[in-house]
Image (cartoon, rainbow, N blue to C red):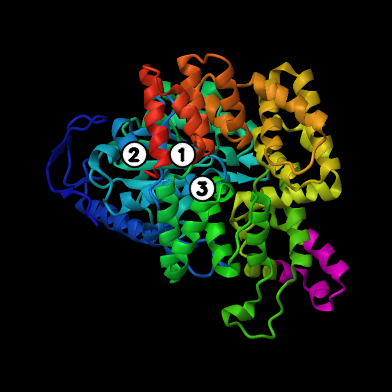
Amino acid sequence: MPEPNVSSNNEFSGTAHTVIQVNALYGNIVFAASAELTNQATAFEQRYRRGILEGLDRVALFGPNPQWAETFQLSEAYVELSLTDSATQHSGLRVDHVLAGSRRLLLEGSAGTGKSTVLRKLAIRALRGELPEDAAGCSSPVPFLLKLRSFVKDDTLALPKPEEFVAAIAPLLGSAKPEVWVSHLLESGRALVLIDGIDEVRDVHRGHVLAWVQHLIDFYPEVGYVITARPAAVPETWRKQLRGLGFATTRLEPMSRRQVNSFIDNWHRAMEAEWAAEDLKHEVAARRDLSNLATSPLLCGVLCAIYISHHYLPTTRSQLYDAGLSLLLERRDVARGIRGSFWQLPRSVSQPLLCQIALWMVLNGQDSIPWSTVLTMTRETAHRLGDHHYRADPTGLLHDLIEQTGILWRSGEDNLEFALSSFQDYFAATEIINQDHVRHLVLNAHNPTYHDVVIMMAELAGEAVATRLLTGLVDRAEAEPLYQRDLWLLATACLGVVRELSPSLRERILEQARHLLPPTSIDNAYHLAGAGVFVLDLLIGLAQSREFTDAEAAASIRAASLIDPRHTRVLLDHFSRRSSPEVQRELAAARSRDNGT
């Protein structure tokens, strides 16, 4: 690991300083007029790097183990993901290449696409001195990975001051930090601030996050900044504002065939089950439904775990999650070598409790739940069970739920969160159906934080509930111009996953979907791609019936290649003679995705 540059020069002229007489330098900044304090800062940086590196590089892959007890090095299991620049629409970019052009980056991606993992990998490379200097701004930046959801307590967002960064990341080191250590790093530009999860704080707090970022940039303009969010949580006005601050605005692309194959190889190597990798890669390549599912690290991991455990693969996302949950909620601890007398919570107990927790989070608009609230739910569950042990000790039931499933984890002393937000959506959608909270979901469907729950509910629901949900979305779309486009797009996405629906309601939504086609921009293309495979057929039919502008053609190619790169040949051939550079660029990118590169 590269050492910080420590010098005994007697003067320094920095961007924020006049020439100062000092006895020592820390990095390329004045730290203290004392060699002893400078040495303390250097030693602390080494402690900080060592202390957080091990934790960041330790990852629990989704596997057949119900507690995800086996952990692996992220640096070995990681698959390099590709980005699209939202401003230029150039695709297939690497994160360090984007950072080399701009030290500030907004990284967008839907649930499970790997945003947080990209940040962790950036932090690991920074800690090891492996980031290219043009991307990092110096040879060995000090990363600060800040998870926004960890700063929410009792529905209040308390964003940290610079000197609080260390305590937020490594609480054990907080009291050992030299005075103003973080501030000096920020002033010198020897820091990389990684801000994870704008979407994981309530929308009423997001303006405060943006203002906080602006203040950091005002005072520390030389620092590298990377922010992650789901696209629905970032309005276009924010993107423009961030671009004005020098941010490159990007989004994670769905995994290509090559990336999926690399992930499968790495996963099976980590699990010491290489024998199954080739069979699974063949299955995914041969089945269109599976290739459409295997678009993110989360879903690829679930596919791997299911295949190695059961030797079969599901055909829908809800089936995929259900099978994955059976690994976590139903596998006995005796399979892991724990004594046979240890009682495993049956799924009939664990799933309803997890559903209650997830529903509370959705209804309260929060990504965590107070421990005391969960304990009350657990006490009621223990009472219904009639189990004397748990009735006397409901805390034991809660601890068993956390320990045995691995689905919940404690964020601080007083809160619980779902380890994977996608499972939170699954459980919440299940409970909304069970408790008939469809109206609440419809009334809040314009809120981006509800979108994944709405789509999951449409997939899980029977015809009667799905009809109420989609009718509610359609009625709101027709009555509320402000949210009209978003609600129609959401209904269109639901149409791609719903199991049963009346022909008249389906046609009503399809008719509006046709009005939303073709997409007029790359951003539109991403929204439409989320609606599913049937959009591809609509695009092909529309392209054959009328002339597209170059912008529409380029956006249509992008949408089609995102939906299913292997089944875009008709559309690509249709636009292949266009001379527009924009169209030709998208054609080349689509063919690249089709070839698995």
In which quadrant of the rendered view does residue 479 lie? top right
Observer-nearest of 144 and 300: 300
- Residue at 64% over, 66% down: 328
**Percent coordinates x, y for residue 23 in the rendering:** 16, 46
Q: Is residue 515 above or below residue 327?
A: above
Q: Please state, as top left, top right, bottom left or bottom right, where the N terminus lies in the image.
A: bottom left
Q: Which residue is mark 3?
A: 296
Q: CA gap, disc 2 to disc 1?
A: 28 Å
**Percent coordinates x, y for residue 323 in the rendering:** 65, 61
The disc, 2 or 1, on the residue closer to the chain's N-terminal end is 2
Circle on res. 186: 2
Mark 1 packing: few (<14 Cα in 10 Å), some, or many (20+)? many
Mark 3 packing: few (<14 Cα in 10 Å), some, or many (20+)? many
Q: Is residue 330 above or below residue 365?
A: below
* Amino acid at pointer 1: Leu
* Amino acid at pointer 2: Leu
**Percent coordinates x, y for residue 466 in the rendering:** 80, 40
Circle on res. 217: none
* Amino acid at pointer 3: Ser
In which quadrant of the rendered view does residue 356 lie? bottom right
Mark 2 packing: few (<14 Cα in 10 Å), some, or many (20+)? many
Q: Which residue is mark 1?
A: 252
Observer-nearest of 586 and 121: 586
- Residue at 69% over, 41% down: 497
Q: Please state, as top left, top right, bottom left or bottom right, where the C terminus lies in the image.
A: top left
Q: CA gap, disc 3 to disc 2?
A: 34 Å
